[in-house]
């Protein structure tokens, strides 16, 4: 039974590390056109509207975002393209992998697995005999 718990804990740790943690990071206005295409883009407009795109590119004075629509049933995947003028953009952020958060989560999981394994090991090594406190079991010390 101990072996199955260790395996389950290891699988859980690998799953958490594989998913990792992502964070939204703001792109400065001067760097919008630095890359030809960005993935995981969120655009907030001056009007307060928020758009999430699978990927976006900047050309000229506009940003063109593309979103795959999985919520529509049918034999063909649908893709929606939308253009926004750069002057209308209040904030542009991209979703990136965050190694720091992933390390914290992964380290916490590994520490938890080690504590659990040491607790199981300590329980196995305790054979039920009283500690050498000098007294008899059930009697006064």
Image (spheres, rainbow, N blue to C red):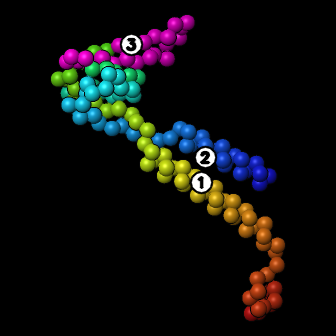
Residue at left offset 21%, top offset 16%: 60
Marks 2 and 3 in Cβ contact (< 8 Å):
no
Residue of label 1: 110
Q: Nearer the viewer, residue 48 or 110?
A: 110
**Magenta span has 62?**
yes
| Drawn side of residue 97 relative to residue 113, left or right | left
Residue of label 2: 13
Q: Is residue 98 visible?
A: yes
Packing grade of label 3 (10 A; few <14, some 14-19, many >=20) is few
Give the x, y percent position of residue 53.
37, 23
Q: Where 87 sits versus 79, above or below?
A: below
Helix, strand or loop for disc 1: helix
**Magenta span has 131?**
no
| Drawn side of residue 105 relative to residue 11, left or right | left
Residue at left offset 64%, top offset 55%: 113
Give the x, y percent position of residue 100.
43, 48
Mark sitting on residue 80: 3
Packing grade of label 2 (10 A; few <14, some 14-19, many >=20) is some
Q: Which range of residues does the magenta coloring cover?
A: 59-81
Give the x, y percent position of residue 9.
66, 49
Marks 2 and 1 in Cβ contact (< 8 Å):
yes
Q: Disc 2 to disc 1, how far (Cα)?
A: 7 Å
Which corner quadrant of the image does residue 131 belong to? bottom right
| Drawn side of residue 10 relative to residue 66, left or right | right
Q: Is residue 51 visible?
A: no
Q: Work out whether mark 3 precedes mark 1 in sequence or the reverse, and give the earlier one.
A: 3
Residue at left offset 19%, top offset 18%: 61
Q: Disc 2 to disc 3, how far (Cα)?
A: 36 Å
Q: Work out whether mark 2 precedes mark 1 in sequence or the reverse, and give the earlier one.
A: 2
Q: Nearer the viewer, mark 2 or mark 3?
A: 2
Give the x, y percent position of residue 36.
32, 22
């Amino acid at each position: 039974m101990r072996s199955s718990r260790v395996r389950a804990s290891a699988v859980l740790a690998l799953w958490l590390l594989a998913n990792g943690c992502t964070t939204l990071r703001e792109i400065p206005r001067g760097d919008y056109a630095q890359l030809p295409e960005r993935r995981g883009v969120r655009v907030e407009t001056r009007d307060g509207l928020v758009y999430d795109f699978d990927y976006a590119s900047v050309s000229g004075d506009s940003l063109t975002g593309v979103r795959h629509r999985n919520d529509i049933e049918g034999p063909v995947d649908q893709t929606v393209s939308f253009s926004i003028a750069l002057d209308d953009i209040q904030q542009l952020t991209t979703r990136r992998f965050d190694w720091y958060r992933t390390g914290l989560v992964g380290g916490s999981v590994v520490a938890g697995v080690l504590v659990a394994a040491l607790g199981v090991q300590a329980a196995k090594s305790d054979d039920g005999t009283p500690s050498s406190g000098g007294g008899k079991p059930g009697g006064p010390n």
